[in-house]
Image: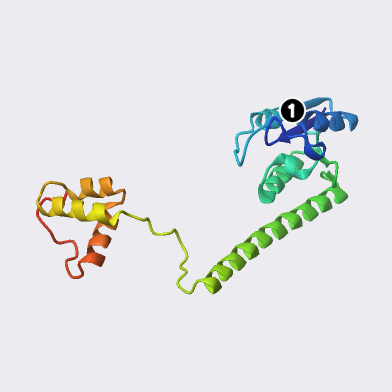
């Protein structure tokens, strides 16, 4: 049995011949007897028709896709899927690249695809590191990690007085300020050095 798989990110996608109908037409022209079609938005991993396809396809069958990226968004995951299919003696025909199967040339194609995945990963890491370097060069105070959460200074002062008077607990005050208890204590330490976590008994 020869299966086809078509995927678009949204139902309205039709640029560059990537619509579902265009993909299905091309897949059937290349011998696909049954075509599974998925539509999903963004980076969603929910592809029910791909799951159905993987449950139906058997040893000796062929899977046809228009391009490698139709099988997913991440090259490493796609290569893992292709290797799994080939190990099950399923031929994967990527129309714009070639055929991956359990022949010498087919395994060579898998090796090439693995190299593409590794290259993509290295390029992502390189771009990420270049971006960090650029931010450090532009801002000497740049620090990696999540940007500290902003808070309302005036509101903190009001809430801090209520905590000191025993009207509010630290937990309730921190919640109203929109920060964690740990963050509340850090703010207190920054504003009143030396006090640490000391305060009235009502700190729960």
- Seen from the viewer's position, the closer of residues 88 and 201 is 201
Instruction: Please tell me which residue is depicted at 77% across the width and 44% down the height of the picture.
Output: 68
Where residue 101 appears, as percent x and y from the top left, is 82, 43
Q: Secondary structure at mark 1?
A: strand
**Protein image colouring:** rainbow
Point out residue 4 in the picture as x, y percentages from the top left corner.
79, 31
- Can I make out residue 22 in this image? yes
Q: Residue at x 59, y 65 (%)?
A: 131
Foreground residue among 106 and 191: 191
Q: Which quadrant does the N terminus fall into?
A: top right
Q: Which residue is mark 1?
A: 36
Q: Nearer the viewer, residue 67 or 176?
A: 176
Is any part of residue 61 visible from this angle? no
Q: Position of residue 56 (x, y in %)?
A: 71, 27
Quarter location, residue 41 = top right
* Residue ID at (68%, 36%): 9
Instruction: Kindly give the residue lying farthest to the top in the view shown.
Output: 34
Q: How many marks?
A: 1
Residue 120 horizontal side relative to residue 190, left or right: right
The percent position of residue 113, horizontal first and vertical second, equals 77, 52
Residue 39 horizontal side relative to residue 152, left or right: right
Position of residue 51 in the picture relative to residue 143 (left or right): right
Q: Quadrant of residue 16?
A: top right
Q: Is residue 156 left or right of residue 162?
A: right
Can you say whether 201 is above or below 136 in the image?
above
Quarter of image, res 118: bottom right
Q: How many residues crowd mark 1 within 10 Å: few (<14), some (14–19), many (20+)? A: some
């Amino acid at each position: 049995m020869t299966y086809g798989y078509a995927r678009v990110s949204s139902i309205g996608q039709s640029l560059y011949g990537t619509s579902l109908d265009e993909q299905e037409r091309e897949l059937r022209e290349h011998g696909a007897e049954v075509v599974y079609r998925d539509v999903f938005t963004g980076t969603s991993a929910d592809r029910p028709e791909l799951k159905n396809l993987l449950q139906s396809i058997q040893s000796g069958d062929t899977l046809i896709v228009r391009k490698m990226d139709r099988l997913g968004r991440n090259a490493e995951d796609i290569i893992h899927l292709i290797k799994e299919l080939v190990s099950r003696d399923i031929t994967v025909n990527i129309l714009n690249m070639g055929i991956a199967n359990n022949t010498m040339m087919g395994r060579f194609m898998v090796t090439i695809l693995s190299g593409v995945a590794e290259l993509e990963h290295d390029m992502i890491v390189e771009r990420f590191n270049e971006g960090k370097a650029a931010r450090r060069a532009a801002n000497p105070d740049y620090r990696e990690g999540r940007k500290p959460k902003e808070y309302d200074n005036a509101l903190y002062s009001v809430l801090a007085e209520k905590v000191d008077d025993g009207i509010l607990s630290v937990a309730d005050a921190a919640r109203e300020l929109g920060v964690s208890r740990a963050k509340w204590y850090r703010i207190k330490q920054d504003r009143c050095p030396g006090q640490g976590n000391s305060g009235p008994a009502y700190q729960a």
